[in-house]
Image: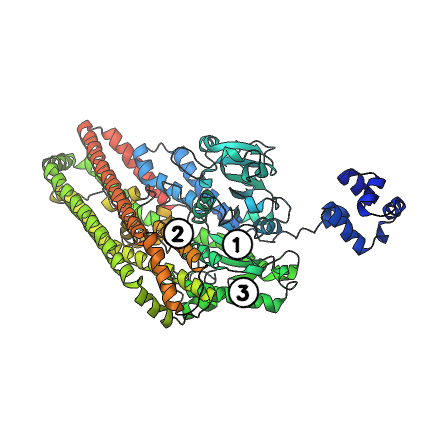
């Protein structure tokens, strides 16, 4: 301890002034400064009380920073595969003059799919304010890089990436770029477009070192009024070799904008670490927020396919565990047990059934054993408490890159398997144009002659699908409304309270309210899923009829058709951000689409590769969360006495009536089906346009009768066939 430096540099006091402050003789101050080891503990405490300084400021002591999480760089292999495939494609494009038509049809989607699929896992740190998110990140990084004092008022999403991923257009001496929270009609900077210089510069509002996060990302910051929404930070740490880390605003802050940022960012997460303070672990608000995170978390574990444990990408952490009787292990175990039990009470059985259908695992006893293994205690003050968390996270982060690489290779194989037949059919078409040109002249006459009738029939079928969407929308609304009415009434709720064994305790009643939220969300999503299956068959019939309608002329002239309506429709869907119930067709359209829809939907839009579709429908999840918070607020202030079951039931009914909960869900259902119709319209328009372009191009080739040009196309398609055969996997 350097007491003299503390007095002079920190307090700006003379010895006499310091002595007066502590009510001691000046000579005593002189002796303490000469021999700091002689200062008693009670004197240190008095200095701290009188000056308002911290122990660290007085003594110069700094808590040691933990060693960085030692994660093997398993990403190297995935990155090698990505570079190998990208170089192979780039070489092919450089060496062969492939026309835009063939490049777009056979290479662009493959290239974009690979780029979208081999992406580092994103580890998202979530939790209410002041739970120690930044402290945890610093521990994982092994460096005191992220400012911790600002956490309670953080208002931006911070994406932390390895320094090697910094784009060349970002200045060498700059570690951070800060982005606005809104540009045009987009509300959150898309970190997947980090390499797009024009895009990033259009969002950028600041740059500098890590310290600027305080200025832009806190309500006390000088630049807070500039409305920052996100920042990207480039650091050098072992863990960043295998993943990106995202530090999000705390849930439940005073601004709705912060919650919206957090909701949107967590939908892109591959791994979620949810923090809740150990001395108030898993309060009802935590449970309500965490349920949404769990329902939208991708399912990475696959039985007989990888060695990930069930729910391996979920970590529910009791942070600041040292505050519980100095880290008492038995007490912490009880806290984790209780938190898991309470969360389980609010999760629906339907959630586990949906997860089972994707993972292949059976989650016995409503997933109790699997979920409990995802609960951890954590504190950097007592390192051995962190060991289980660190070990488990290390295993997951080392495994995910291997799964990503293997699934990307599977995607490439399936892509080739799906697209090569179309390529060979097109090759056969051009060879036929050389040897049997008259057949193609006749083919085009047949197409032109029947096109008006075919178009009219196709328009009728489109209208039939739109009518079906409207019918399914009304049926969905009615079915959910009937369910809501049957459940949200005083008698039904009283019966439910008794059947569930709810006790006359505040915690039990709040958990019951949260379970009501889950029941309604599950019912709504089940109804929409069921109706989407019906639409999927209707969509499948539409695509089949479209294919049959354009195939007549080909069949009549004994020509193999090389226009793939199903692929064209799916490719169009992949460019649409919200597809609603049309997604049911994607999962039922064949093995390739069912297994690789997450990648296929990313081919054009650049969305992240995920292991499986989310189990929740976002538009409904958002409404359900709002309903859950309303119930928490209402039930949390109730006085439970007398015929308490009836009082609770009436309170729930009142919340639903006063806030038009049924109407909110109906609005969400309408929004879902509006998205569905919009997606169907866009996809069918793209299908019509592509068919029209196909016929136009065929006319051009036949009318031109340019053998040399046809031979060039034949040669190009042969090269592409060889390209497919020799992809390095």
Q: Secondary structure at mark 2?
A: helix
Q: Position of residue 589 (x, y in %)?
A: 27, 52
Q: Secondary structure at mark 3?
A: helix
Task: Give the mark nearest the N terminus, 1 or 2.
Answer: 1
Residue named by callout 2: 626
Residue 392 occupies quadrant: bottom right
Q: Position of residue 457 (x, y in %)?
A: 12, 43
* 3 vs 2, front mark: 2
Residue named by callout 3: 336
* 1 vs 2, front mark: 2
Task: Name the mark on residue 257.
Answer: none
Structural crowding at the residue carrying mark 1, measured as other residues with C-alpha within 10 Å and reported as few (<14), some (14–19) or many (≥20): many
Q: Give how far apart the Cα atoms at labels 1 and 2 are.
A: 33 Å
Q: Position of residue 26 (x, y in %)?
A: 88, 44
Q: Secondary structure at mark 1?
A: helix
Colour setting: rainbow
Any part of residue 328 in sight: yes
Task: Name the mark on residue 397.
Answer: 1
Structural crowding at the residue carrying mark 3, measured as other residues with C-alpha within 10 Å and reported as few (<14), some (14–19) or many (≥20): many
Task: Give the mark nearest the N terminus, 3 or 2.
Answer: 3
Any part of residue 554 in sight: no
Q: Give how far apart the Cα atoms at labels 3 and 2 are.
A: 26 Å
Against 425, residue 624 (above or below) is below
Tag 1–tag 2 contact (CB < 8 Å): no
Q: Position of residue 178 (x, y in %)?
A: 52, 36
Q: Nearer the viewer, residue 588 or 364?
A: 364
- At x 71%, y 48%, the residue is 54
């Amino acid at each position: 301890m350097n007491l003299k430096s503390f007095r002079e540099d920190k307090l700006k006091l003379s010895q006499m002034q310091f002595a007066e402050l502590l009510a001691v003789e000046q000579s005593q101050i002189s002796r303490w400064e000469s021999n700091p080891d002689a200062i008693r503990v009670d004197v240190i405490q008095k200095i701290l009380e009188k000056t308002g300084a911290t122990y660290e400021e007085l003594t110069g002591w700094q808590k040691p920073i933990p060693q960085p999480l030692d994660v093997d760089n398993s990403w190297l292999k995935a990155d090698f595969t990505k570079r190998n495939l990208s170089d192979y494609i780039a070489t092919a494009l450089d060496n062969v003059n492939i026309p835009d038509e063939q490049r777009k049809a056979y290479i662009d989607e493959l290239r974009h799919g690979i780029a979208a699929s081999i992406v580092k896992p994103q580890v998202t740190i979530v939790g209410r304010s002041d739970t120690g998110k930044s402290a945890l990140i610093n521990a994982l990084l092994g460096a005191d890089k992220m400012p911790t004092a600002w956490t309670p008022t953080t208002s931006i999403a911070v994406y932390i990436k390895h320094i090697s991923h910094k784009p060349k257009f970002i200045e060498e001496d700059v570690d951070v770029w800060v982005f606005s929270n809104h540009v045009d009609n987009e509300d959150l900077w898309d970190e997947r477009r980090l390499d797009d210089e024009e895009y990033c510069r259009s969002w950028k509002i600041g740059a500098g070192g890590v310290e600027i996060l305080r200025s832009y990302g806190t309500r006390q910051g000088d630049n807070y009024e500039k409305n920052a929404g996100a920042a990207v930070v480039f650091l050098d740490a072992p863990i960043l070799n295998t993943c990106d880390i995202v530090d999000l605003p705390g849930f439940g802050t005073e601004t709705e904008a912060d919650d919206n940022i957090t909701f949107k960012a967590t939908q892109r997460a591959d791994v979620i670490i949810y923090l809740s303070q150990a001395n108030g672990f898993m309060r009802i608000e935590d449970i309500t927020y965490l349920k949404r995170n769990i329902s939208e978390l991708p399912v990475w574990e696959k039985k007989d396919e990888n060695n990930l444990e069930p729910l391996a990408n979920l970590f529910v952490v009791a942070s600041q565990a040292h505050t519980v009787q100095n880290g008492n292990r038995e007490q912490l175990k009880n806290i984790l047990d209780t938190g898991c039990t309470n969360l389980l009470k609010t999760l629906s059985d339907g959630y586990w059934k949906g997860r089972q259908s994707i993972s292949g695992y059976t989650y016995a006893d409503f997933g109790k054993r699997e979920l409990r293994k995802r609960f951890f205690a954590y504190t950097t003050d007592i390192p051995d408490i962190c060991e289980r968390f660190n070990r488990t996270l290390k295993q997951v982060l080392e495994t995910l890159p291997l799964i990503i690489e293997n699934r990307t290779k599977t995607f490439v194989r399936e892509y080739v398997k799906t697209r090569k037949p179309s390529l060979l059919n097109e090759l056969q078409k051009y060879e036929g144009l050389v040897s049997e040109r008259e057949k193609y002249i006749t083919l085009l006459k047949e197409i032109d002659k029947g096109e008006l009738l075919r178009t009219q029939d196709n328009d009728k079928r489109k209208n039939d699908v739109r009518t079906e969407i409207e019918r399914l929308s009304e049926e969905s609304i009615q079915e959910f409304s009937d369910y809501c009415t049957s459940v949200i009434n005083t008698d039904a709720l009283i019966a439910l309270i008794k059947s569930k064994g709810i006790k006359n305790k505040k915690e039990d009643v709040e958990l019951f309210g949260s379970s009501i939220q889950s029941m309604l969300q599950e019912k709504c999503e089940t109804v929409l899923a069921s109706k989407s299956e019906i639409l999927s068959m209707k969509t499948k019939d539409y695509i089949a009829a479209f294919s049959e309608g354009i195939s007549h002329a080909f069949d009549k002239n004994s020509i193999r058709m090389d226009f793939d309506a199903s692929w064209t429709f799916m490719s169009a869907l992949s460019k649409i951000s919200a597809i609603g119930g049309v997604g049911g067709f994607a999962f039922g359209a064949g093995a390739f689409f069912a297994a690789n829809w997450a990648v296929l939907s990313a081919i054009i839009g650049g969305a992240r590769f995920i292991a499986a579709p989310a189990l929740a429908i976002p538009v409904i999840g958002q409404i359900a969360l709002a309903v859950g918070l309303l119930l928490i607020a209402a039930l949390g202030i109730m006085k439970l006495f007398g015929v308490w079951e009836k009082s609770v039931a009436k309170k729930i009914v009142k919340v639903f009536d006063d806030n038009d909960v049924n109407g909110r869900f109906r609005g969400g259902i309408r929004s879902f089906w509006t998205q569905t119709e919009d997606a169907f319209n866009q996809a069918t328009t793209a299908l019509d346009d592509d068919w029209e372009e196909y016929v136009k191009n065929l006319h051009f080739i036949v009318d031109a009768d340019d053998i040399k040009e046809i031979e060039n196309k034949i040669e190009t398609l042969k090269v592409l066939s060889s390209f497919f055969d020799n992809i390095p996997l």
